[in-house]
Image: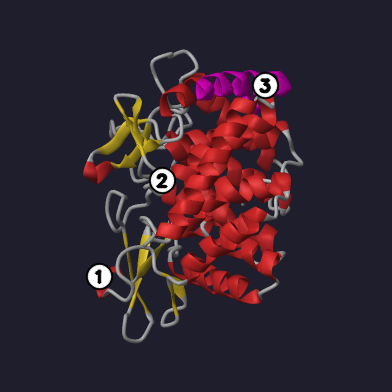
Amino acid sequence: MNEKIIQEYIKLGQNVDQVFLKQEMDWICEKLLKNIDRFQENFPSACTTNHIYRIKANDDWTNGFWTGMLWMAYQYTKNEAFYDIVMKNIKSFQQRLADHFVLDHHDIGFLYSPSIVMVYRDTQEKSLEKIIVEAADKLLNRFQEKGQFIQAWGQLGNPQEYRLIIDSLLNLPLLYEASKITNNPLYAHKADAHYQQVINHIIRSDYSTYHTFYFDVETGKPDHGATHQGFSDQSCWARGQAWAILGIPLHERITQQKNDESKWTHVFEYFIDKIPQDLIPYWDLCFDDTSHEPKDSSALAIVACGLMEAQKVGYRQDAQMIAKGMIGALSQTYTSSKYKDVEGLLMHGVYAYSENKGVDEENLWGDYFYMEALYRLLNPEWKTCW
């Protein structure tokens, strides 16, 4: 592993103190208040166009990140303006379930964990339990017995879509939450099965990761890995590697099954070995400083949260300090704190390069995980939505 990069992060992390964290949260909450004035009860699009989010209904896989940021802002400021919008958002998420509106995918966890679960853990409001369980039921309906995995996209059983993707590791906590609420182990058992299929097949022998992995629709046997958003089937999409770095210790913390420390360590080291000079990864880890390719700041924000989860389960003692350094690196030139006309928080992200979608723009998950990382550091005992 590139120890020089680790030491550079640790050096930067020494400057990430409580004063810094509060300053970052202050400007973020100020910007979110400004954005609320524009979006009202609607939602920002998944990514910006020319650094401005489009106004949308509750119809995308990313809307939970918006509500999650608003609730963190409420927890931090106690400003009722945040609370009022979150309560309206909750009604919208409840209606989306009732209408089964754009829910034929696996990202139901991304929708309902940062929104409903986060508020539930903070308030213990019993009426939210029904929403959580209903959302988990919709996710569970995508579980394929042949192959023992949750199908990511498309019509169930479609041979062209008989696959999982690495992002799914962050959808599983919703199932574990439903198991706790209902005392029904089925949700957790299916989540466990899917998790095993992800880490057993999507991680390559060199500890890079495929974005997506296919199974045989007739037999359920593992078939082949591929990409959907990475540079190629053989490359390593940066955000995909980041999902693994967060998803593995997250699963071990939830399940109390510490089995994958060695695998996580190698996956993390692969990521670190591909970090360029300015400490921010390119959108695919196959690129280096000679490539002139766009960065994906969101991948580093996700990894920072993953390191804090890793410290919780005892993977490495310096994990939190490395995470602080990553946040320090992002704060220097990758946030919009000095740009009033930029609506997002974390600049220089990539949504889907091959579709020319959100390239060198802000995106909701980048904003969310940057803010989550800050709030984790500010409140070490805070219960995340995962």
Question: Which three-letter amino acid code belongs to the residue tagged 1?
Answer: Gln
The label on residue 238 is 2
Name the front one of labels 3 and 2.
3
Q: Number of numbered discs present?
A: 3
Residue 58 showing in the rendered view = yes
Pointer 3 local density, CA inside 10 Å: few below 14, some 14–19, many at least 20: some
Instruction: Please state if 62 lies on the left or on the right of 22 as rendered.
Output: left
Residue 260 showing in the rendered view = no
Residue 346 in percent (x, y) is at: 46, 28
Residue 310 in percent (x, y) is at: 66, 50
Instruction: Please state if 77 lies on the left or on the right of 332 as rendered.
Output: right
The label on residue 160 is 1
Residue 326 in percent (x, y) is at: 56, 32
Task: Give me the residue at 55% from left, 61% from top.
Answer: 172
The label on residue 177 is none
User: Is 170 situated above or below 148?
Assistant: above
Residue 257 in percent (x, y) is at: 69, 67
- As rendered, which of 301 and 293 lies closer to the eye? 301
First in sequence: mark 3 or mark 2?
3
The label on residue 22 is 3
Task: Give me the residue at 56% from left, 69% from top.
Answer: 191
Colour logic: secondary structure
Pointer 1 local density, CA inside 10 Å: few below 14, some 14–19, many at least 20: few
Q: Determine if the magenta segment contains residue 23.
A: yes
Q: Secondary structure at mark 3?
A: helix
Marks 3 and 2, how far apart in space? 29 Å
Q: Which residues are magenta?
A: 8-33
